[in-house]
Image: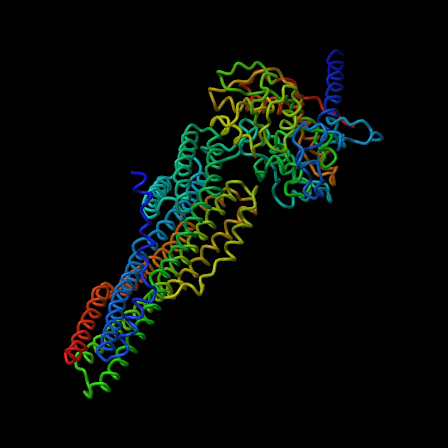
Amino acid sequence: MTTALAQRTPPAARYTPPASGVLSRVGNLRQHSPGRLQLILAALLTLGLLTGLVAGLTAHSASAGTTRLADRAQPLLVEAETIYSALADADTTAAQAFLAGGLEPVELTRRYDDDLARAATALTDAARLIPDGDDAATSVEALATGLAKYSALVATARANNRQGLPIGASYLSTASQLNRDTLQPQAQALFRSAGDEVDAGYDAARSSWWLMLLVVLFVALGVALFWSQVYLSRATRRTFNVPLVAATGLIGLLILTTAVLFTSQRSHLSGADREGSGPVAALAEMRIMVLGERADEALTLAARGGSDKEADFDRTAGALDFGDDRVVGVPGLMIRAEEQHTAYLAVHDKVRALDEGGDYDGAVKLAVGTEAGQAFGDLTGTLDEAITDRKAAFTTQIEDAGSGLDLLTVLGPLLALAACALAAIGIRARLEEYR
Amino acid sequence: MTRTRLALIAAATVTVLVTAAGCGGDSSPRYDATPAPSSATGAGPGDPQAAPATSAPASEAPCNARASLRPSGALPKAGSMPAGSRMAAIQKRGRLILGTSQDTLLFSSRNPITGQIEGFDVDMGRLVAQAIFGDPQKLQIKVIGYDQRVNSVLKNDVDLVADTMTANCARWKDVNFSSIYFEAGQRVLVSKNSTAKSVEDLGGKKVCSVAGSTSYDNIGKVKSKPIAVARTSFGDCLVAFQQNEVDAISTDDTILAGMAAQDPYAKLIGDRYTEEPYGMALNRDDPEFTQFVNAVLEKARQDGTWTRTYEKWLGRLGPAPQPPAAQYR
């Protein structure tokens, strides 16, 4: 056995064909007319099939990108926003319930429970949208753990409050600290990474690299078709090769369809970005800032001027910009929101004036009373309305952007195949003449 | 006769104690202090290097933290404060601003049912309001952090601080104290099933106290080296204790009594291992206000108000003792 193997020459050495074999044979084809026709046919078929393939792939990539944007990235942004604002709202509500003193007002308890439920549901939904190992997954995990701890702390605070023990207030402030210093920054990180994902989603949906390759192939195929017809009309004295003309027509149709579909897709994508996800992100930030103001107001009163949350309030109020360029499409609502914010600020100033004038009880009464609640509720209501409106705009735009792309996924390769078949028929007819 | 001698001995002991320990520097720096390169911020409580760094120069007169300014004559009639005095300014404002905490049960805590802050310290503040306005309700309460008690007085954010605040020499450098209105001492609160008998048995255990309090500094001075854990308020310490984040809480017995009242699974152990005389902190620029407050306290000691207030808030600790005798410089 061993000797037999040893005597064998390695097969690789024997199989090396002469390097010039295939190339020279193809090169030789150029020397005679039938050969040249065969070359032209091969080139047209190759380019035609490649174009068909790439057209299909480009359409598929763009369609999949658009779908992913609508089904994953944007919903994740919405869930992240829900988590963030639910946490901010829970903090605000808990602080107000504390301020109210005595037994917690029923509507505040309900609102707080509702906030926690909303945050928990959104968290589950967000976890479903995030692939394992993603950065956002870490945030979701931290939020899930923190949320459980937070609700436990608030529950303890309530239990102590009910027994009239001042330690309840300390549990509440510990909970609030957890919410503000740990949970909200995590929710913010999740919100940011969801925003990045939306941006990446737009890039994927545009499929710019695929589209560029397709354009190059279109140009190459067009030139090849044109040149082969010029050659044929010169060599055969027939002005038109009807099947080749038809093939050119089909490719022209494909180019036109692609151009129309992608132009429309891109314009709708820009629309979705400008009128949909952009405003939603900006409005979400606004809503969170407004909730932060309300929490600052309550915490300033809870600490009786002991902490500088009021400075925080002023900073937020100064940074709020209802005329934000990113918010388009809801000018009426924004004007209303600005008016309502001014109205709320007026109530807040009254609260501060009472507190600073020594009427603490009056300040608390006003802050947790219906006047302030109404002013603030109107404001968040308007912002909610604007966000819902912009979410709808996004959905419409993204649906329009995706329409027709699936058709092109099938139609592209089919048209290219038909063109190839026609080219083959047209050139074979000329080849027959040499037999 | 015996009482005076005893008081003298006690005063002398405390003077020694306070000059040795209390004057070792407050852990909360003045708001306008230039940050020291190494001490204050970096040094832990009881850090051997931190204590001597700020101690008084040898030339200074020996400090008696209990001795305050002697009242000058009788109290002015409520509602007619001498012109130009701090009291007149307060009267003009219409309310006295008291800095205190809201989570020290029995001394100053927020009643969860009414939302009002109440306790022994608050009532001391009300005595002053009563003396200025003839109305104990003309009092605005500002909740301040323990580490801001000196600074709030320095910055005149509040008129006076009554917040279980130990009068010691280090603080006397920045603020005036009233005469002593309460005698407390540091003890330890542990869980019911703990085997520790005193603070010395807590070596290596986590013991919570509040940043900026003398109690926190004192934990670092215990020989068995417990680990001092700082929180921003005593309520936070109790939360940490109930969440098993710390093994014990150490501060004034009075504050601990308020905590034990809220947690049936907690108990106080050991004897007082420090003396913590409480005084109200007042601004040094208005010595007439310190004298006025001392006169108010003197009256409360004599007419039984002090005893009634003690019985109201601290009656559960036993019968009211004699009010601490005022000392003046």
Residue at 62% from the left image edge and 25% from the top image edge: B305
Q: Give the farthest residue toward the top.
A: B2
> Is residue A182 rendered to the left or right of residue B155?
left
- Residue A36 drawn above or below residue A14: below
Give the vertical position of B84 relative to B120 (above or below). below
Q: Nearer the viewer, residue B199 or B266?
A: B199
Q: Position of residue B85 (x, y in %)?
A: 72, 42
Q: Position of residue B286 (x, y in %)?
A: 73, 40
**Quarter where residue B197 is shown:** top right
Compared across the picture, whether A275 is left or right of B70 comes to left
Residue A259 pos. (x, y %): 29, 73
Q: Is residue A207 above or below residue B287?
A: below
**Quadrant where the C terminus of chain A is found in the figure:** bottom left
Q: Find residue B321 and report its image quarter.
A: top right
How far across and down, in percent of the image, does residue A148 sit?
39, 36
Viewer-side residue, A128 vs A328: A128
Q: Is residue A115 above or below residue A20?
A: above
**In front: B328, or A288?**
A288
Instruction: Residue at 48%, 24% (x, y): give it.
Output: B262
